[in-house]
Amino acid sequence: MNLILRQLNENDEQAFLEGAKEWGGESPHWYSFIWKEGMAFKDMLEILHKENEGIDLAPDRVPHTMLYGFLDSKIVGRVSVRHELNDYLRKRGGHIGYSVAKRFRNKGYATEMVRQAIEFCKNRGMKSIMITCADNNIPSWKIIERFGGTLQDQVWDEEESEMLRRYWITI
């Protein structure tokens, strides 16, 4: 598989805007936490850089690196690697959050993105990571378990009115 997981750069504007169209009908947060229609790409890159460095973070945010999965010149998905956990992320989200655009699902891209994200975490010196998913998201928890995820517990999430599975992976 020729999927490359990496941070965006100034040459990725067209790929990013095309990729955004793939998430039509879904929450825009599945693609980007900060981009909004009409936002200058350069401004978004600056915010991503600051969030990666932990500069000017909103009170509920932690330092994180947003990585996008490129297949040739197309973005198929994204991974957010949180460098640390706050109370919210300990319950919902964990260290790694990922999504793949609908038309690219069931092709192994999420598995490859998670594999590369775990390697990214390892290179950052992280020893263990938490990943959460909805209990009914069987493809997601199968990916997590494939990489050695140990189920910590299942908790009810009031925000989304769903049961969550919380896993730990030792790197």
Image (cartoon, rainbow, N blue to C red):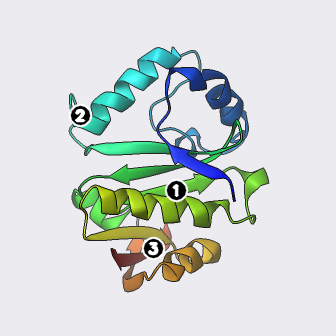
> For this view, does 72 lie left or right of residue 11?
right
Check the image and report above or below for 42 versus 142: above
Q: CA distance from mark 1 to mark 2?
A: 21 Å
Q: Quadrant of the N terminus?
A: bottom right
Tell me where residue 169 appears, x and y as whole percent.
Answer: 36, 77
Disc 3 packing (10 Å; few <14; some 14–19; many ≥20):
many
Identify the residue at horizontal 59%, vertical 63% (top origin).
112
Q: Quadrant of the C terminus?
A: bottom left
In the image shown, does 154 or 123 lie closer to the viewer? Answer: 123
Residue type marked 3: Leu
Identify the residue at horizontal 43%, vertical 69% (top origin).
132
Callout in the foreground (3, 2): 2
Check the image and report above or below for 116 versus 135: above
The residue tagged 3 is 164
Disc assigned to residue 98? 1
In the image shown, does 93 or 160 lie closer to the viewer? Answer: 93
